[in-house]
Every structure is written in C-alpha cells, then in structure tokens.
Image (cartoon, grey):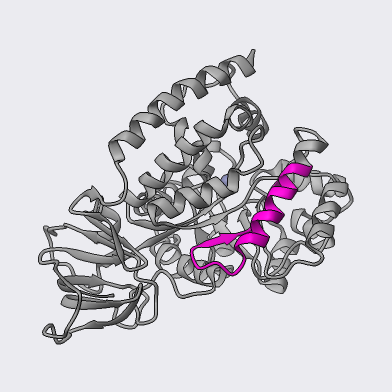
Amino acid sequence: MKTLLTNCRIVNPYGEISFLDNGSILIEDGLIKELGLLDTSVQVDETVDLSGKTVLPGMINAHAHLYSALAVGMPFPKGNPTNFTEVLEQVWWILDMALDKESTKASYESGLVDHLRHGVTTVIDHHSSQNYVNGSLQLLADTADKLGINISGTFEMTDRNGEQTFQESLDENIQFHQKYKGSKSVRPLIGLHASFTLSDESLQAIANALKNESNWGIHIHTAEDKADQLDAVNRGYKSTLDRLNHFGLLNENSLVIHGIHFVEEDINIIRDTGAMLVHNPSSNSNNRVGMTPNEIINDLMAGLGTDGMQGNMLAEAKEGTLIRSGHLTGGAPGVNYAELLFKNNPEIASKLFGRKMGKLDPGYSADLAIFDYIPRTDFNENNWIGHTLFGMENPSDVMTNGIFRIRNNEFIDINEQDLLKNADVQSRKLWNKMDLIKK
Ligand SMILES: [Zn+2]
C-alpha cells in the first residue's frame, strides 16, 4: 500500500528535514518512505492533496492513566486533601476501586479518542482498576487496536488491597508481557504503583516472577512526593531508586515517573541502569507536589507525560512552559518542553516498541498529526515552537501506521458519538459507586 501526501507544510523539528513550506510525503506499508520535494507523478494507491495543511509527527504521551478518563467533571472529594497521600486516598484510590469492566472499557475508549483527537498516536499507559484485574490489559490492547493507536500497557501493583489482589495484578502483568512481548503496536511493561505502597516481600515476588523473562521493563511512580523518598529511607535504603535497584528491578526498558524529589543517588542509578525518566508538569502542579528541577529534566533527557490530566500533548508542553515560568525569576533559564515532546518522547517510544516512532524521517512509523492551520504570522523553521504550542489546536486528520484514523475531522473506524454517549452513562454509574465507597 502506497500513499502520497502532497502540498503540505512539514514540521519535523528534530528530524533530517526539519521544515519544508510545501512538500510531499510518500508512505509505504505503514512507514515513511521518503519526504521532501518529491516527483508527484509516481504510481501510488492513493494521493491525498493536503493544500493548506501542516503535518507534524504523531505525538507520544509517555505517561498516561486512561482509567481516569471519566474523572472529567467528577465531584470534588468531600474533605479538603491537605497532602499528596490524602489526594490519593480521597480521589484516585476510590476511583480505581469503583471501576468495573464496563466503566474501564468506557474509560479506555473515551481516553484514547481524546488522545487521537489531539494528534497523539502512541500512549504509554499505567492502568489501575483494583476490582477488575484479570483481563483488563487484554481489553486495553483490544480497544487500542480498534482505534488504531500504539499502546503500552501495564497494571499498577500495590499492597493496599491485600495479598490476593497483588498476586492477581502480578499475574496480569506477567501474562500480558508474555503474550505481547515483541508485538509491533502493543508494548507490555510491568506496572508498580510506587515504592511506598509495596513491601520488600512484594518487590521480591515481582523480581522472582521476572527471573525467567526477557525484554521486560517496569513502569513506576517515583519520588513524586517527599513521602515516597522518606518511606524508602525509613526502610533502610538511600532512596526509592536505591530500593528498586536493590531488588534488580531497574533496567534500560524501565520508566520511572516524576522524580521530583530525586537525590544524587537516584540520578546516578538512572545513568547506570539506562532507565528513563518522565516528567508530568500539569499533574505535579495540580497535586502541589513540587517541581522537578531543570537540571534533572535536562541531564536525564526526560520524556513528557500527562499523568492522566489530559490527552493533549501540545497543551501539556505549553502548560509545562508556563507553570515553570511562574516559578522562575526574569532571565533564569527554563526547560524546552518542545524538545521533551518532539525529541525525548520519540527516543523513549522507539526504544520501548523496538521500532522508529515520533519523527517524519524515512523508516519511521507513518504516525502523523495533520493540522488545518492558517498561521497569522510568518511560520518558518526557527519559530515552529511558537506556532505549535501557541497557535495550533486540534488536528483535522490523524494517521497511525500509514492508515487514516481521522479524516477531515471525522473518525473512520469508530462511531465517536456512540462511544461518548456510553462514556457518559458509565461515568454516572461510576461516580455513584464512588460515593458508596466513600461512605
Ligand atoms: Zn501517574
């Protein structure tokens, strides 16, 4: 299958051809074959004229919680959480107890629709539905397949709901890993909630289960709040990563999320193991847990995630920029969030999925976000950050693996209205159930 996209502005910030005012992209068998000023008379299956449109690489969300998709508009907790642990106890640990199969499915569907609508073509998810464990990751893979989105799936293991749920979660992770390792569009990871909700016995059980597995990596929240570091120290370790490393759980496929309160030891361990850090500014700001220092983000080439706050990565990059600016004095250096999104995230996804993703270079997956964007000022290779973060809104067309999923603002494979109507029904049930759990 060969598709030729013509007459488009190409914005490929960290790629070989970084900017082109009017060019073409040739796609063959799901991959970008070539791009530039191409001969448009070549024989192809389909030619699509994108006059007036701007093509960006399909974006990657390096840390998502699709299970929180039905939390939009949810009633606030009755108490007023005064710290991070109370936020978890009063909101997220009630939500993830209330989710059943149907509401989980609706969360996946509506959350993935939200991502695709914003040109996000790869989602690295961290799932938790503590009363619906068995089969929850298979449902995620099936839903992602239906929408044509690249997915990394994992289930949050924790001790907080007893030994049996922990064991079921471990089994779910291992079975999913065994089934999907080596898959092209599904990347299993081994999910841990956070160091402070797992005992030494549980960490040892996870390490034992992985002993005979290959190509695995863990996906875990680390040092999001000082309480996580303090817990590890109280257990006799130097830090959260020192604790995970002690059990042999960190490697080059591992994703460690947040790292706001990292100490020197953590930074050295990331360097030594090749684990990857992901930063989530809008969530950190929302939870009032502090701000990851510039040096940690820059030195460790952190990726960018939304931590369940949204499916819009351009908004996350813009908000990250503004949140940081709000804490800095005039002239102090900030963080280049466009680099996290368009350079670091593609490296993380390419490493995890074992194929080239997140750029518009030959050999890369044909994942594209196409914007019907008429700039009101000059748009050139030097000012693309301003246009992408402060000018563009939603893409009109989205392609994953060489296939259009959204064309002229309409989904091709799914009925979006039906799916959102079902999400509305499920959200009402879910919120009622949460009310009962709170009582
Ligand atoms: Zn998270």
Q: Residue at x 56, y 19 (%)?
A: 433
Please identify the quadrant where the N terminus is shown. bottom left
**Residue 249, magenta (yes or no):** no
> Please, is residue 110 above or below residue 301 in the view?
above
Can residue 290 be seen in the rendering of this structure? no
* The magenta segment: 167-194
- How many numbered discs sit on the rendered protein? 0
- Residue 186 is covered by the magenta coloring: yes
Residue 118 appears left or right of 265: left
**Direction from residue 230 to residue 131 in the image, left or right:** left
Q: Which residue sits at x=34%, y=83%?
A: 16
Residue at horizontal 33%, vertical 73%?
13
In the image, 431 versus 80, the foreground residue is 431
Q: Percent from the top left, x then y, of residue 314?
A: 35, 54
Residue 137 image position (x, y, % from top left):
59, 48
Out of 182 and 224, give the one closest to the viewer. 182
Residue placed most toward the observer, 137 or 275: 137
Tell me: 60 left or right of 257: left
User: Going 49% across and 53% down the picture, which residue do you hit?
Assistant: 305
Location of residue 127 by image quarter: top right
Above or below, 321 relative to 30: above
Residue 227 x %, y %:
73, 41
Residue 234 rendering spot, x and y as whole percentages: 86, 45
In the rendered image, is residue 60 in sight?
yes
Quarter of the image with the C terminus is: top right
Question: Between 239 and 66, which is closer to the camera in this rendering?
Answer: 66
